[in-house]
């Protein structure tokens, strides 16, 4: 299924979900950390070859939880991929994204999100020719993608809570000198939320 259609279907499904019965503080900030797993063709074109495995991920989100169960969110995430297999042209790939979207509270203890993200990919690689032996650094253009996610809300003491979740994201971005790179990933992480 096309990722854009998947995001729109998930967003439409949220509209008919039941409204949460017990809301916490309307504004929350989450610090998130976990792991991300590349899926599908993570790299194409000049960057093809070599396997990239799971990577650490961290980020932060601001969430407004409206009385209707709907609320906007915005945040930042970074995924740090290592590539050391034979045939891998780069040693490290760092995907940095800024996202904005809508969150729906489901049955008071679950959430679902759908949104857009803006991101870029940075890579370190060994140079060739005149740059042979040097470790070079390149950054892709800022590009547009999408994400969908689901998770739980676990209340702790006071206004603190835990928020484990899963998110699927995709982004196509381009290096000026090397061409298109497709990124598809599934991230599993744990958020620590503080309400205001």
Image (spheres, rainbow, N blue to C red):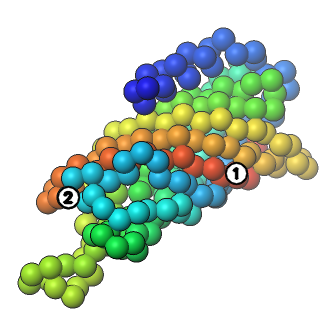
Q: Nearer the viewer, residue 47 or 148?
A: 47
Local crowd size for mark 1, using a 10 Å CA cut-off: few (<14), some (14–19), many (≥20): many
In the rendered image, the residue lying farthest to the bottom is 133
Residue 110, image x, y percentages: 75, 32
Q: CA distance from mark 1 to mark 2?
A: 36 Å
Residue 180 visible in image: yes
Q: Nearer the viewer, residue 107 or 196?
A: 107
Local secondary structure at mark 2: helix
Q: Of all residues shown, which one is farthest toward the top?
A: 16
**Looking at the rendering, which quadrant does residue 31 occupy?**
bottom right
Residue 107 against residue 153 in the figure, above or below: above
Quarter containing the N terminus: top left
Residue 41 relative to residue 14: left or right: left
The image position of residue 188, as x and y in percent, is 63, 50
Position in image of residue 29 (x %, y %): 67, 47
Q: Residue at x 70, y 16 (%)?
A: 17
The residue at which mark 1 appears reads as 191
Q: Return the x and y of residue 10 as percentages of the image width and height.
A: 56, 23
Q: How many marks?
A: 2
The kind of secondary structure element at disc 1 is strand
User: Mark 1 or mark 2: which comes first in sequence?
Assistant: 2
Residue 165 versus residue 106 in the image, above or below: below
Residue at the image position 36 percent from the left and 48 percent from the top: 41
3 sits left or right of 26 in the view:
left
- 173 sits to left or right of 93: left
Choose mark 1 or mark 2, whichever is in front.
2
């Amino acid at each position: 299924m096309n990722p854009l259609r998947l995001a729109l279907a998930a967003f439409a499904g949220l509209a008919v979900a039941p409204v949460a019965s017990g809301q916490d503080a309307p504004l929350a900030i989450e610090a998130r950390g976990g792991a991300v797993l590349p899926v599908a063709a993570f790299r194409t074109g000049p960057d093809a070859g070599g396997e990239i495995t799971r990577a650490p991920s961290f980020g932060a989100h601001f969430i407004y939880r409206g009385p209707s169960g709907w609320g906007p969110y915005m945040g930042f995430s970074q995924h740090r991929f290592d590539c050391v297999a034979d045939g891998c042209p780069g040693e490290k790939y760092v995907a940095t994204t800024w996202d904005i979207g809508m969150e729906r509270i489901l049955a008071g203890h679950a959430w679902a999100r759908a949104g857009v993200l803006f991101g870029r990919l940075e890579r370190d690689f060994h140079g060739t020719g005149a740059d042979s032996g040097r470790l070079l650094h390149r950054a892709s253009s800022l590009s547009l993608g999408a994400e969908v996610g689901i998770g739980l809300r676990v209340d702790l003491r006071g206004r603190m809570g835990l928020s484990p979740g899963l998110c699927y994201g995709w982004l196509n971005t381009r290096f000026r000198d090397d061409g298109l790179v497709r990124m598809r990933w599934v991230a599993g992480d744990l958020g620590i939320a503080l309400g205001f």
